[in-house]
Image: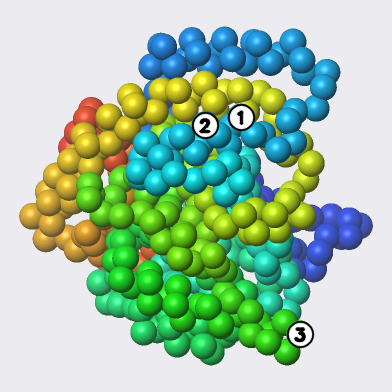
Amino acid sequence: MGARKEPTFMEQSPLLPLREELAQVAPYGAPQLEVAARLNVNENPYPPSPEMIADITRAVSQVAAGLNRYPDRDFTALRAALAGYVLRESGLDFPVEQIWAANGSNEVMVQLLGAYAGPGRTVLGTEYSYSMYPEYVRGAHSTYVTVPRQSDWNLDVDALLQGLRDFRPSVLLLANPNNPTGTACREAELVQILQQARETGPDISGKPSCTVVVVDEAYGEFRDPGKPSALALLEKYPHLAVSRTMSKSFGMAGLRLGYLVAAKAMITDIMRVRLPYHLSALTQAAAIAALGHAEEQLCQLAELRQRRDTLAAWLEDKGYTVPRSQANFVLFGPFPDRHQVFSDLLDRGVLVREVGPEGFLRVSIGTAAEDQAFRQAFEEVTG
Ligand SMILES: Cc1ncc(COP(=O)(O)O)c(C=O)c1O
C-alpha cells in the first residue's frame, strides 16, 4: 500500500523560451496515490467485467494487424456507436454528423475553445466549478471570467444572465451537474440561459453573434431518473453543445474517450481545429467494444446513486453542510482546517479531494467497502 511519489514541479530553465504566462504554472492534476480507498477523482469504482475485457481485447488485437495505417480520421463507426448509446441513455436519436469525440471530454473542450475562443475573447463560467476550465481558457489565450453562485451553490441564473450581457463571452462553460458542488440546474433555467445567449456573443461583421453554451454533462448519467438531459434542448438551440464522457458513469476513465453532441455546423467548426487522426485506432476499437456493454454499465448507476444519497444523509446527520448532489460524489464541510482532515483521512488510507468552497472536501462514491472505509476513517478523524 506504499504511496507513489508525486513528481515535484521544477522551475523552468531560463534558456527555454517558455511562454511568460506559464512561468509560475505547475502541471495540473490531482494526486495519484496507491491507497486503499481512492475517492478523489470521481471514477466509477467498478472495473470492467470479464466479458467486457474479453471483447475489448479481441477488438484491439484485430486492429493491431492494421496499425501500419492511420486510423479512420472521422471515426464514423465509433460515432455511430456513441449515437446508439445516447439513444439508449436519453431516448434521443442523433445522426452521426451531430456526434464528435476526442481523448476525454477535456480534449473535446479544448477543441471547442480552439474554434470559438481565442485572443481577445472571453469565456464565462461560474465560481466553484470544474478546476480545468481556467486551464482550457488559458490554453486558448482567452480571458476566463466567472459569476457567483447562490449561497447554497445552486446556479444564480440572474447573475449568469447579467454576466452574458456584461462580458459578451463567445463561450459559456456550464458543468451540469456541477463539479465540485454536485448541484444541478433545472431545464427551465437552461432554457432561460440559452434564449439569452442567442445574441450575447462578440460582434462579428458588426452583428452580435451567439454565445456557444457548453453544458458539460460529465456526470449527466448520475442525474435522478426522470430528469431530462440538456440533449433534449439541442433541436431548438443550435448554439448549445452537450459534452459527455465515458470516464465516469461508463467506468472507462483509462480509455480517455469524451464526446460531444451538437449541431452539425458546430461539429464542422471543430473539424477545422482538430489534429488529424487524433483518436487512435486502438481507442476507437476499444471504445466501440466497450459501448457494446452499455447495458451492464448503466445497471450500476442506481446503486451508486443510492449510496451517494445515503452517504450525503449520513454526513448531514453529523451536522455538515452537503449540497444536494446529482453526481457520483458529495461535497461536505465546512471544517476549520480542511487540510488537516484531508491528511488525517489519507493517513488512514482514504484519499479525498480538497476542492471547492473554503473549508469543504469532496468524496467520490466508491465501492460499498470503500464507502465503509471512508466512514470509519472519518469517524476516527472527527471523533
Ligand atoms: C465537470 C467535468 N468535466 C469534464 C471532466 C473531464 O473528463 P474526461 O476528460 O475524463 O472526459 C471532468 C473530470 O473530472 C469533470 O469533472
**Camera-side residue of 180 and 171:** 171
Along the horizontal axis of the image, is 130 left or right of 182? right
Quickly name the residue at label 2: 81
**Camera-side residue of 322 and 69:** 69
Q: Residue at x 31, y 45 (%)?
A: 222
In the rendering, at what x and y percent does residue 310 appear? 14, 44
| Real-space CA distance between mark 1 and mark 2, rounded to the nearest whole angstrom | 6 Å
**Camera-side residue of 323 and 155:** 155
Q: Residue at x 73, y 70 (%)?
A: 118
Q: Earlier in the sequence, mark 3 or mark 2?
A: 2
Q: Kindly state the secondary structure of the residue where label 2 is placed.
A: helix
The three-letter code of the residue at mark 1 reads Ala
Q: Residue 205: tell me if it is visible.
A: yes
- State if disc 2 and disc 3 touch (CB < 8 Å): no
Q: Residue 29: tell me if it is visible.
A: no
| Real-space CA distance between mark 1 and mark 3, rounded to the nearest whole angstrom | 38 Å
